[in-house]
Amino acid sequence: MEVKTFKKGMRVPHNKHAGAGALADCPAPSTVYIPLAQHIGKPATAAVEPGARVRAGTRIGAADGFVSADIFSSVSGTVKAIAKRRTPTGSCNHVVIENDGLYETESLPKLVDRSRESLLARIKDAGLVGMGGAGFPSHVKYAPKTLVDTFIINAAECEPYITCDYRLLVECTRETLCGAKMLADVLGVPRFYVGVEDNKPDAINALVRVAAENNIPADIIALKSKYPQGAEKQLIYAVTGRKVPVGKLPADVGVVVGNVHTAFSLFDAVENDTPLYRRALTVCGGSAVKPSNLWVRTGTTYADCVDFCGGIDDGCVKMISGGPMMGFALDSLDYSVTKTSGSILLLSGTEANTLQPSACINCAKCAKACPMNLMPMYIDAYTLRGDYASAKRFGALNCIECGCCAYTCPAKRPIVQSVKLCKRKIRELGL
């Protein structure tokens, strides 16, 4: 099988220590804290009041506008409060539910047909979003305004440590492929691609075998294990050779990229009438006592997940929500699992960068690694000077924040942090 890839990028240690174990059920805690902001766009509005009785699958948050998504209870019990709590990126209202331990469920109505319109409605009614981290509401993404002829499932999972998508591919191969076929049907695309990095040969073999056995029109594409192979523009180039122009979306070149977990969740919503209130999640890192992949109900705290995996050893120096390259550093584990929570990383001193940054030495390693062909050292320098217009001219808005620049920088410059600051300033100043 030919192995495809993109230009530039870099090799990073895989460290996928949790990948060998099967997905385990993480017990829900006595109280869950379910955020009403689990997606890009407007947060949902509370659809229940304190004192209300809910079941797993009860809608507790109503989408507020087109670019928003419904939120569902993950347990049965009693709503105790609607309270503002912190998230890794800010704060939002949470529905606080006391779990009665009965796990009574509430299902979506049976789907009467599998037409494009019915599947698109089921995507919306189940509260599906992109589950690779971005969290864009799927009923919007799968109704593009431009003609699409190519659909790609992003199964690269190129960030170190994370293996939850990999476990879905090997444990729920048919379900994931059938869900992907439904997404392709919504787009009107007769065949679709699944791009998988070649460090997952058993997943590739399982996908090829199951697609053939079930007559699923999927082309399985082996991708070079290189970071950021799973970035949308890089994946599209590797699979199709098409380039997404600056300022454009994949749909503008006739492509939509979907997530493994979103495909699986659509299958669950169609076949089992189950809305989205649980997901697969990786707990890993050198300070994780038992690296694991878990089925977790939304609203479960990170601390509950880590405790189920045996806790943290004394050598932990950094905790991250998401991957080590693009995730968010945590000050505690008192945050809730959402639809987009892919991993919790507990890094030891030998894994995490704890060095203080020094001055740029103009080695250009960041530019050599940048998959977007930018010169990150200039963006960082102009941002430090407050010259955001010049940083914009050097492509600050085109950065995908993959972290290749910061990873390869010998001076340990926080370049991604500079880019994020620069983007915010450009918006604030209207540049």
Image (cartoon, rainbow, N blue to C red):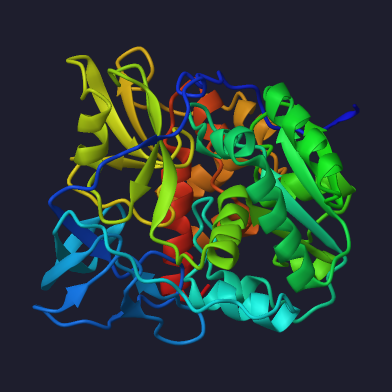
Q: Quadrant of the N terminus?
A: top right
Locate residue 170, reporting x and y percent. 62, 33
Which quadrant would residue 339 be assigned to in this image?
bottom left
Whether residue 88 is situated above or below residue 6 in the rendered picture: below
Please name whichever residue, 352 or 171, is drawn nearer the observer in this view of the structure: 171
Left or right placement of residue 387 versus residue 106 in this view: right
Please name whichever residue, 224 or 143, is drawn nearer the observer in this view of the structure: 143
Please name whichever residue, 270 or 184, is drawn nearer the observer in this view of the structure: 270
Left or right placement of residue 21 versus residue 184 in this view: left
The number of discs equals: 0
Residue drawn 63% across and 26% down?
365
Locate residue 69, reporting x and y percent. 45, 75
Residue drawn 41% across and 81% down?
63
Which quadrant would residue 413 be assigned to in this image?
top left
Locate residue 185, reporting x and y percent. 78, 68
Asked whether residue 355 is in view, the answer is: no
Asked whether residue 260 is in view, the answer is: yes
Locate residue 235, reporting x and y percent. 74, 45
Residue drawn 30% across and 60% down?
74
Whether residue 413 is situated above or below residue 340 in the rendered picture: above
Residue drawn 26% across and 52% down?
336
Left or right placement of residue 348 versus residue 367 in this view: left
Which quadrant would residue 314 be assigned to in this image?
top left
